[in-house]
Amino acid sequence: MQDSAAQTPLDEVDHRLLGLLQDDASRSNQALAEAARVSPATALRRVRRLVEQGVIERQMAIVSPQAFDAGLTAIVEITLDRQGAEHLAAFEARAVAEPAVQQCYRVTPGPDCVLVVWVRDMSHYNALVQRLFTDDANVRNVKSYFATRRAKFDPRVDFTPPAAQPRAQPTPSSAAPAP
């Protein structure tokens, strides 16, 4: 990703392209350009720039967990004994290297990290716990929540500008003096 100071500001065409790609990144450049109401050359150039600038991190298929007969999603809170920058970075590096970890966040207040993990079954979860938490002397506390139903999953980023905020009207001052 380029330095943010060197990035070209996003305009309405970029927003249209990003919205369309978030809906379906598999569409052809021709179809994307048509839907965005720009030429295919403009669409291709803009998308390449958005990738080069790191606005588009990657394109991938989202696989439904329901396609498998089994599977557990867990949201896991991690509290470390030592929270120095090097300790947080070391745990984070181990967590993001673990294939079962789908998302990793440093959070505050409360736990130091929150992970979203997907494993095939409880035995795979137990193996993950051993590898990632029990074997790490700096992990003080682990609290896991197991999903029983996924009501919503949408990785889209809502980049639409907020609606213009109504301005507060000045309150008329009373002409009568206070008693």
Image (cartoon, rainbow, N blue to C red):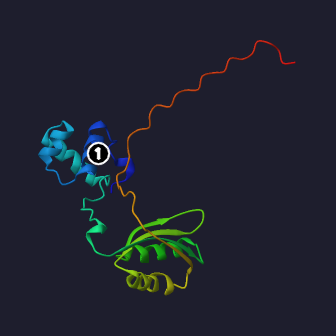
| Quarter placement of the C terminus | top right
The residue positioned farthest toward the right in the image shown: 179
Q: How many marks?
A: 1
Q: Mark 1 Cα within 10 Å, few/some/many (few <14, many 20+)? A: some
Quarter residue 80 falls in: bottom right
Q: Please, is residue 61 above or below residue 76 in the view? A: above
- Quarter of the picture containing the N terminus is bottom left
Residue at x-position 18% and y-position 36%? 37
Q: Secondary structure at mark 1?
A: helix
Using the image as rendered, state which of residue 47 and residue 146 is in the foreground.
146
What x and y, as percent, mark residue 170?
63, 21
The quarter of the displayed image where residue 9 is located: top left
Residue located at (21% from left, 51% from top): 48
Image point 14% across, 48% down: which residue? 29
Point out residue 7 in the picture as x, y percentages from the top left corner: 34, 47
User: Residue 150 is drawn in which quadrant?
Assistant: bottom left
The residue nearer to you, when weighing 137 against 143, is: 143
Q: Position of residue 89 (x, y in %)?
A: 48, 72
Residue for badge 1: 19
Q: Residue at x 55, y 69 (%)?
A: 112
**Foreground: 77 or 56?**
77
**In the image, residue 136 lies at what x, y percent?**
51, 84
State the residue in front, 83 or 115: 115
Seen in the picture, residue 123 relative to 153 is either above or below; the reply is: below
What kind of residue is marked 1?
Answer: Gly
